[in-house]
Image (cartoon, helix red, strand yellow):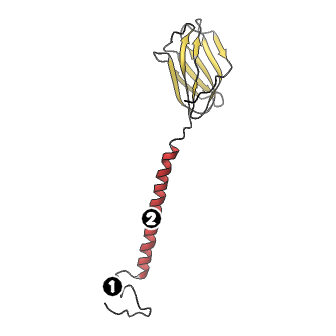
């Protein structure tokens, strides 16, 4: 090994190192920055799993029956957000059930209509995040121009 010709005695270029000192420092800083970026990315990805558990929407479900308890398929079910007037609609299935997913939290008015039955209204239905609110509907035989309004809210169920 050759003797260093510089005043400080152990110069990197003279000791066989092909990179001058300033280039080595840039390389070290670059690796440190890369390590920092990779750690930050890892933390962000790890945190993403925790945020998926939060549900910001509620669900409205129930069964539509007549006064004898027989199911009513094909009934029109509408939920109207009282504050925003946003309307979501569905139709009851063959077994008389209905389901409205992804409702924004708020107070809703539920309306159910079916041919040969009176129109049903349920006021003040509270939909909360991460909850399923059940509203069972019993339609009365009659003209669809007749209306039945229930103003008390059913209790909230979390499922």
Work out whether residue 91 can be spotted: no
Q: Residue furthest left?
A: 1
Q: State the image coordinates of residue 1 (x, y, percent, origin top left).
A: 31, 90
Q: Which residue is mark 2?
A: 35
Name which residue lies at 57% across and 8% down.
Answer: 67
The reply, left or right, for residue 10 in relation to residue 131 is left
Q: Is residue 156 above or below residue 147?
A: below
Q: State the image coordinates of residue 115 (x, y, percent, origin top left).
A: 53, 9
**Disc 2 to disc 1, how far (Cα)?**
28 Å
Name which residue lies at 46% across and 56% down.
Answer: 41
* Nearer-the-camera pick, 43 or 93: 43
* Nearer-the-camera pick, 6 or 3: 3
Specify few, some or many for label 2: CA neighbours under 10 Å numbering under 14, 14-19, or 20 or more.
few
Q: Secondary structure at mark 2?
A: helix
Q: Which residue is mark 1?
A: 16
Q: Quadrant of the C terminus?
A: top right
Q: Is residue 146 above or below residue 55?
A: above
- State if disc 1 and disc 2 touch (CB < 8 Å): no
The reply, left or right, for residue 129 in relation to residue 33 is right
Specify few, some or many for label 1: CA neighbours under 10 Å numbering under 14, 14-19, or 20 or more.
few
Work out whether residue 129 can be spotted: yes
The reply, left or right, for residue 5 in relation to residue 156 is left
- Res 138 → quadrant: top right
- Res 87 → quadrant: top right
Name which residue lies at 56% across and 37% down.
Answer: 56
């Amino acid at each position: 090994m050759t003797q260093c010709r510089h005043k400080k005695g152990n110069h990197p270029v003279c000791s066989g190192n092909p990179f001058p000192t300033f280039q080595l420092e840039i390389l070290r800083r670059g690796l440190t920055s890369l390590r920092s970026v990779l750690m930050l990315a890892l933390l962000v990805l790890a945190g993403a799993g925790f945020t998926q558990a939060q549900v910001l929407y509620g669900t409205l479900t129930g069964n539509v029956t007549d006064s004898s308890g027989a199911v009513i398929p094909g009934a029109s079910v509408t939920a109207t957000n009282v504050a925003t007037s946003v309307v979501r609609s569905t139709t009851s299935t063959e077994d008389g059930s209905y389901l409205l997913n992804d409702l924004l939290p708020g107070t809703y008015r539920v309306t159910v209509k079916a041919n040969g039955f009176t129109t049903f209204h349920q006021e003040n239905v509270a939909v909360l995040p991460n909850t399923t609110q059940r509203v069972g509907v019993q339609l009365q035989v009659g003209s669809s121009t007749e209306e039945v309004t229930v103003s008390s809210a059913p209790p909230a169920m979390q499922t």
